[in-house]
Amino acid sequence: MSTYLDCNATTPVDPDVAEIMWRFLVENFGNPGSRTHELGNTAKIAVEHAREQVASVVRTDKSDVTFTSGATEANNLALVGLKGYLLESKKTVITSQIEHMAVLEPLAHLEAAGVKVMYLAPNKDGIIEPSDLEGLLSDDVGLVSLMHINNETGAIQPIEKYADILARTNTYFHVDAAQGFGKDIEQLQHDRIDMISCSGHKIHGPKGIGALITKRRRYKRPPITPLLLGGGQERNLRAGTLPTHQIAGFGLAAELALSNAGKRHLCCLKIKEDAIAAFDRLTPVYNGLKYSASHTLNLSVRGVNSEAAIVALKGVAALSNGSACTSSSYTHSHVLKAMKVDDDVLEGALRFSWSHMTSKVDWELIVKKLSELT
């Protein structure tokens, strides 16, 4: 059986998370919106506890957490939800060329509606330079949306530096933290970040659940309007019956991520060191390595096509050559294109990603299989 090395696409569910989900699926199955009986009250208590668990990761109040179906919906709520404000105030948005499609496509929607969007280019290491952001800022900028950890290269963006720059402005700051929530803890606790998108299945929780965290600044949250109508759930920001089992699972996954972040990081770092030691014999090009997270490695072996490499590694390792959201119709990585890598590097890019739950990896066999393609 292949070793699973595609954790940036999704992570295995922690057994304790699966257990609490089962309990709220089978035993405590009440609707948290039902006020008239014990099952509904039990579900409501579980939801509020999970809200607190998620909020604790970024050191904010539980009332700031709005549960969504995942980070994609959270991004849409944060960005498209501000369309009225941006259009009415004639404000510009700043983002980057390396954002996930869950940010780029909502921003394209805003552009089509008349909002001006400016795109920052990364440097050769896949980082958006703080000075480049500072150079574009003006009173006309109403929103900055920049990701935390890039899903393809693993490059950790200097979110704290962006936040420090924005502290001198009234501009709203949104961070897509799908890959960094519960992993790179301290940066997301910066009090100048207004909105944070996160997802349960990237931290060993269930798929189909995430959150948009909207923090108060001067006692006011960003003026978001809802995308879904039909109920008063989630402070009227997100209508629909709350999936208690998924929320409880996400909450526990968030708590475990926060309490075990240090140990998980060291575990992932050891896997990464072993991987680099093995891959170095192929003299690959590492994409975004300098600032990459401990759980991600993106590389290209010159002369080796990524599609051919994935076929050669079938039964050995499950990995990716790009974002899972675009894998059904593979195109070259827009992230690596933005980094201006050579065409042969672009053709051969492979993304390996793992977690503390990853079983022992036979990097030597992986290197052997790739070397046979050169």
Image (cartoon, rainbow, N blue to C red):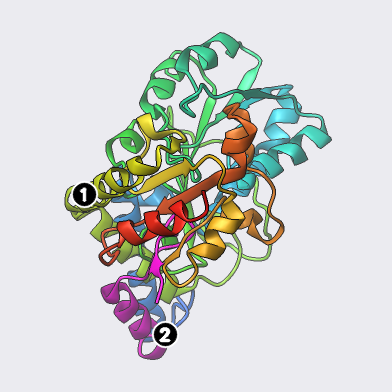
In the picture of the structure, the residue carrying the numbered disc 2 is 25
Residue 308 picture location, percent across and down: 59, 57
Badge 1 local density, few (<14 within 10 Å), some, or many (20+)?
few
From the viewer's perspective, tell me whether residue 144 is left or right of residue 107: left
**Secondary structure under the numbered disc 2 in the rendered image:** helix
**Residue at position x 54%, y 22% from top?**
171
Q: Is residue 60 above or below residue 10?
A: above
Look at the image and give the residue range highlighted in magenta: 1-28
Identity, as a three-letter code, of the amino acid under mark 1: Lys
**Residue at position x 64%, y 45% from top?**
101
Q: Is residue 68 above or below residue 346?
A: below
The disc label shown at residue 270, or none: 1
Tell me if I can see residue 30 in this picture. yes
Q: Specify which label sits upstream in the sequence, 2 or 1.
A: 2
Depth order, front residue of 205/281: 281
Real-space Cα distance between discs 2 and 1?
37 Å
**Of marks 2 and 1, the one in the foreground:** 1
From the viewer's perspective, tell me whether residue 185 is left or right of residue 347: left
- Please say whether residue 278 is one of the residues in the magenta stretch: no
Identity, as a three-letter code, of the amino acid under mark 2: Leu
Quarter-wise, where is residue 95 in the image?
Answer: top right
**Secondary structure under the numbered disc 1 in the rendered image:** helix
Residue 277 picture location, percent across and down: 27, 44
Task: Look at the image and tell me in which quarter the N terminus lies.
Answer: bottom left
Residue 324 picture location, percent across and down: 57, 57
